[in-house]
Image (cartoon, rainbow, N blue to C red):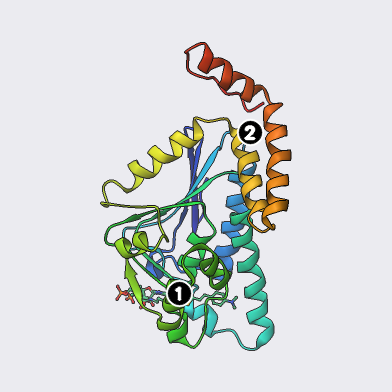
Amino acid sequence: MSDDTITTSIAENIGTLSINRPKALNALNSATLEKLSSRFADLETNDDVHVIVITGAGDRAFVAGGDIADLASRGGLEHYLEFAELIHEVFRQIEVCKKPTISAVNGWALGGGVELILATDIRVAVEDAALGLPEITLGLFPGAGGSQRLLRQISPCQAKELMFTGDRISAREALRIGLVNKVVSREELMPEVMKTAQKIASHSPLVLQLLKRNLTHGQDMPLAAALAHEQAMIGLVLDTADAHEGCSAFLEKRPAEFRGK
Ligand code: DAK
């Protein structure tokens, strides 16, 4: 399925969504965000899709940020708030998606591009990608959830330096500070992402969903409540046919056949 600015494909239980505005280095304007939301929902609700990969079209950019021309054309607080609501909703939709998500960072990830990867579970970047939050150089600050997510995902002093300076960092530096999981050559990017996605997709899709729900809800709870939540969730998992199948397969020394039940 495809349209102008967002393309999607599905193969081997992996849904891939590509942001496709290469002339603007895949910058996100309102129309693209709306399409991103609806195409992402299509993948999330499709039972054939167990893992969702997000990438950028072309070989220059993942996403070079919010669309600066679109932002500059907005007059007045109402317009900013309208955009704020949309981009917050879409990134939250991605963050709480019940299926695991992977960012394939194929080039520049700046501003809203970094804010987008912060809403995904796993990130693999090409070695010549550069990442950063340059909003401050535009008289803005990361306002699509990025200031808060970054602060909670990496060391606060590293997060603050990135936001206060607006500096761009290399993919290797992003790996060092824990912003991405892996750095690979350009040729290796999609094979590596697909290898990880296939490994995840080979597990029970039902148990993966329960695990993701457990992590998404648990991370915002105090530890005692999160532990109680985890205990309740593992109770649900133990009752699934897939948990019985996984344990029986181990004891019978055969590969498990998960059915998502
Ligand atoms: N927006 C719009 N167009 C962009 C763009 C962007 N973010 N980034 C690049 N482009 C366009 C360029 O204008 C250029 O268009 P033409 O001149 O060809 O028409 C084309 O993409 C190619 O870019 P360059 O010619 O600049 O290519 P270079 O290789 O020389 O440089 C670059 C690549 C990525 C270093 C450079 O393009 C660049 O610095 N881009 C801007 C990066 C940036 O500052 N990104 C952060 C954007 S601010 C909000 C929530 C979120 C946000 C805002 C508000 N609310 C809740 C209200 C988010 C803000 C941001 O992300």
**Tag 2 or tag 1, which sits nearer the N-term?**
1
Residue 3: x and y in percent read: 52, 54
**What percent of the width, then of the height, locates residue 148?**
57, 70
Instruction: Say few, some or many: other residues with alpha carbon within 10 Å of mark 2 (under 14 / 14 to 19 / 20 or more).
Output: many
**Residue at the spot of label 1:** 157
The residue tagged 2 is 206
Cβ atoms at labels 1 and 2 below 8 Å apart: no
Disc assigned to residue 58: none
Residue 97 seen: no
Q: Residue at x 62, y 25 (%)?
A: 243
Q: What element carries label 2?
A: helix
Q: Which of 61 and 214 is in front in this view?
A: 214
Q: What residue type is labelled 2?
A: Leu
Looking at this view, is 216 or 18 the one in front?
Answer: 216
State the image quarter where residue 246 is shown: top right
Which quadrant of the figure contains the C terminus? top right
For marks 1 and 2, give the one nearer the viewer: 1
In the image, residue 141 sits, relative to residue 23, either above or below, namely: below
